[in-house]
Amino acid sequence: MLAVSFIDIQGKNMKKAMTQSVVVAVLGMAGMAGMAGMAQAGPYSSMVIFGDSLSDSGNNVLAIGSFDPAQIPLGASQVITDDSYFGKIPYGSGRYSNGPVWAENLAIRFGVSAAPSLAGGTNFAFGGAQTSAPGTDGPPGVPFPFSMTTQLGMYRSAIAPNGGHADANALYVVAGGGNNVRAGLEVIVGGADATATFDSTAANYAADTVGMLAALKGAGAQHILVWNTPDFGLTPSALSANALNPQASALATGLSAKMNEALSGALASAGFGCGVGGVVCFDSFNFLRGALADPRLTNTTHACGAAINGCDPASALFWDAIHPTALGHQLLADAIGQQLAISAVPEPSAYGLMAMGLIGVGWCVRCSRRRQHQR
């Protein structure tokens, strides 16, 4: 339609000259964009992950095997009995699910790796980790599973030979809190004051998370994805506990929400607000709530790895009492990818290529007009 207008107004010669010029300019823009694409296949050079069983892509298998090789067959053959059962060691998949975790799915999208750190990768997540409290499941003298702050220390040791400088082009993920919730609930069930436990758990979680962000930023990290705490009250574990205590799931949701409120305030106070300074926030709390209405999921309330529940893990949200299925992890990866895409802005180099292309189009149009006037 645009070419016809040019023919009608200026004649065939004008149309031909401008068409040729614009084609050259557009091809030039496409060529420069193509070269930029070849220079960097994805938005990040790597993914560095700190987290718990939701993110663990194999560290616990390697660690537990080194502690007690006899536990690996146990992990491969453990049976999910009901909605209260969750794996404290990995399943046969080597993960706390029946397939890949969200980090592995997202890594594929970005063309990077989510291999476990104990295998030389950059995924430092360990199943069972709290943000800072050391684990008690390791052999004597070993605080296992390693907390997220310990994981950060492992990463900083790894980059020490590089002067302690973090890769500015990597994506750093800080994703924890679920085990803090679980530990807090266990203390309350044991008789501790609920209000005091809520306050201390939330304050410690927020301080730990913000401290990790500050350390990463101080080392040079430019892209950080931080999760808030999932709504633990929606897990089969909490829902099934309502049979013993009608307030169980509400208590779990309340503690999760309290922790997230504390985190939001701490992030703002530290200058790490969502969308500020390269920090992207992922709302895992509301992701889980939204999943309840996802038509792709046929079951969102039971541990579908338990045969007694009669539901299909291939189309369910939960594998055991607290861990997602492989499908749940895929949906989680999709949601995180969308959040990162929404938060992303074009790199300065992309703006430069666009500007060069537009300048080229304008220059070619002016050249065409000069040639037309000279005739």
Image: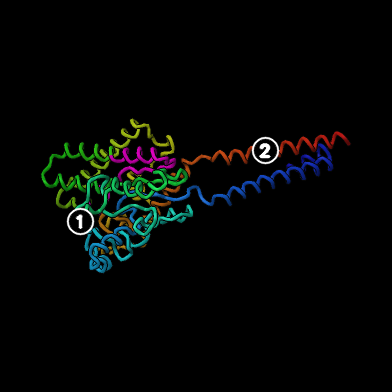
- Cα gap from disc 1 to disc 2, whole angstroms: 61 Å
Residue 177, numbered circle = none
Three-letter code for the amino acid on which mark 1 is drawn? Asp
Q: Is residue 190 magenta?
A: no
Residue 3 lies left or right of residue 207; in this view the side is right
* Residue under the point 12% across and 47% down: 190
Which residue type does callout 2 highlight? Answer: Leu
Residue at mark 1:
137
Looking at the image, residue 266 sits to the left or right of residue 5; the answer is: left
Looking at the picture, how far across and down is residue 146, in whole percent? 26, 51
Q: Is residue 78 visible?
A: no
x, y percent for residue 193? 13, 39
How many C-alpha atoms fall within 10 Å of the one at disc 1: few (<14), some, or many (≥20)? Answer: some
- In the image, 111 versus 143, the foreground residue is 143
Residue at disc 2, secondary structure: helix
For the C terminus, the quadrant is: top right
Q: Which mark is residue 358?
A: 2
Hey, which residue is sitting farthest right in the picture?
375
Q: Which portion, as a residue range, is magenta?
A: 208-237
In reply to whether residue 210 is colored magenta, the answer given is yes
Task: Return the disc, 1 or 2, that comes first in the chain's sequence.
Answer: 1
On the image, which quarter does residue 302 sit in?
bottom left
- Residue 335 visible? The answer is yes
Q: Nearer the viewer, residue 374 or 143?
A: 143
Check disc 1 and report its element: helix, strand or loop: loop
